[in-house]
Image (cartoon, rainbow, N blue to C red):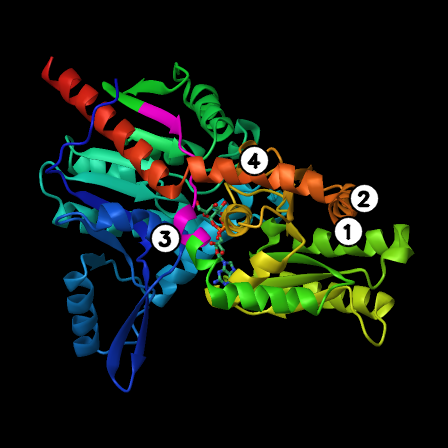
Amino acid sequence: MIASPAPASRYLIVSNRLPVTVSQKEGKIELKASAGGLATALSHVHGTEGSRWIGWPGETGQMDKSARAELDRRLNADGMIPVHLTTKQVERFYEGFCNGVLWPLFHYLLDKVRLDAWVDWQAYREANELFADAVARHYQPGDRIWVHDYHLMLLPALLRKRLPHASISFFLHIPFPASGVFRILPWRREILEGLLGCDLIGFHTHSYQRQFLSSLLRLLGLETQVDSVTYDGRMVRVGAFPISIDTEHFIKESSTPRVEEAAAKMREQNTECKILFGVDRLDYTKGMRRRVLAIERLLERSPGLAGKFRLIQVASPSRTKVEAYAQLRRSLDELVGRVNGRFSTVNWSPVQYLYQTMSLEDLMPLYRAADVMVVTPTRDGMNLVAKEFVACRNDNDGVLVLSEFTGAAWELGEAVLVNPYDIDGIARALQQAITMPEEERHFRMTRLRQRIQRWTVHDWVKSFDAAFAQVTSENERLRQS
Ligand code: GDG
């Protein structure tokens, strides 16, 4: 039986970034709430009485003392507790270790893993200690601590040392790799032991869960069960909790007259030309280069398709200070130029490439108007774009082309699934999507929509919360026996 959470206990959510963007205009601090999926998802637990969100506000010490104090006051008033990082810490901890080592390794891009990262590893440890101090300072007995993502994998054990009886959980938003890949990391033991400070560890899929358990067995020699391991006299539960989106919100926002009109206009302007659409952070895991190469291959294979489709690709700037991202930007600029230069006519270009962060208002009509949504990461923990597209299609139309290597592929089986490494295969899938009969499109989309209506981000929070409450009370019983 699933225990329900104790009503009085409050949550301490911990993530690298607080769900706000801070700016300073004419000496005044401005806070803008992030519209991201995680912020929305957690607003329900963060909104509960007394709960706190602990994280870095994204500011690195350029503010003077009084502005910093004002910032802290403003954040505190909204239930947020800042962990301040210096420019050096951001460079080494966030850009160096998190995004230069862990991110590429966990996404199987071994050639992108920084080779000499000892200094960055030290910074990772120090930053996790800083977060631990901040959490311990604000902890009250009975609080439930929920740590998020790969930036803070040492934190659970650091907290367990400071707060032996606390309820601690962790959720990983990116894939957990196969143990053969994970073991490349020189600090593999420390990371695993860090996570084992938890009562509950959550992943998006059973596959990541199994891979984690297999690392525990192979690297620490622990005897694991399907969904748990006993460590240090405690039960550590390990489970799959696939994240989703606020489906209702997307259904509602994509059906407003403004969005309907904008989408209809886009369609009218493209009656002879199918719209293929992609929107991603500009990240090398998202498979954008191969996507453009697949467009080139499609036009080589089927020259008759020239002028009959175009790919609108939005790439939102991300981690711009990390060299691998700057490199990707240059190479994508060059590739798009080459493919367009080769196939464009006076009236048509195969790829319309927008390097910008598009507002959600502008994104919605594109989700609505697209004939084909192209989501082809080489690895992705879940991928919310795929789910957002489906939620927006209340016309039960549009085809989703989806990489097999996303967490979302485990749920969205009616998409056209592709191997993102197989450029020819992507080209074939795009052709299939462009020419798919209406009846089949409706059949697939209707089923996809049922799935994302049955499992929303609120179900994700509820299921995690229930599992957390259960293991917390199991461990409490163990302690008292
Ligand atoms: C990590 C994991 C996991 C993107 N560009 C624009 C824009 N976006 C929005 C999308 C979507 C979000 O950003 C991206 O979410 P994803 O899930 O696709 O990818 P990551 O950012 O890598 O997220 C991932 C997720 O965490 C949650 O656990 O699914 O696997 O890597 O919401 O709509 N939004 C706007 N303009 C843009 O230009 N407005």
Give the residue pinned by disc 1.
Answer: 294
Q: Residues within 10 Å of mark 3 (few under 14, many from 20)?
A: many
Please identify, in this view, whether the residue under mark 4 or under mark 2 is nearer the observer: 4
Q: Earlier in the sequence, mark 1 or mark 4?
A: 1
How far apart marks 1 and 2 lie (CA) works out to: 7 Å
Q: Earlier in the sequence, mark 1 or mark 3?
A: 3
Report if the CB atoms under discs 1 and 2 are less than 8 Å apart.
Answer: yes
Give the residue pinned by disc 4.
Answer: 447
Q: Residues within 10 Å of mark 4 (few under 14, many from 20)?
A: some
Visible residue check, residue 129 = no
Query: At label 2, which amino acid type do we have?
Result: Asp
Above or below for 434 versus 25: above
Find residue 312 and name its label.
Answer: none
Q: Earlier in the sequence, mark 4 or mark 2?
A: 2
Element class at badge 2: helix
Find residue 123 and name its label.
Answer: 3
Report if the CB atoms under discs 1 and 4 are less than 8 Å apart.
Answer: no
How far apart marks 4 and 2 lie (CA) works out to: 27 Å
Residue 269 position, x and y percent, is 70, 70
Element class at badge 3: helix
Give the residue pinned by disc 2.
Answer: 424
Residue stretch in magenta: 237-251
Q: Residue at x 16, y 61 (%)?
A: 76
Report if the CB atoms under discs 4 and 2 are less than 8 Å apart.
Answer: no
How far apart marks 1 and 4 lie (CA) works out to: 27 Å
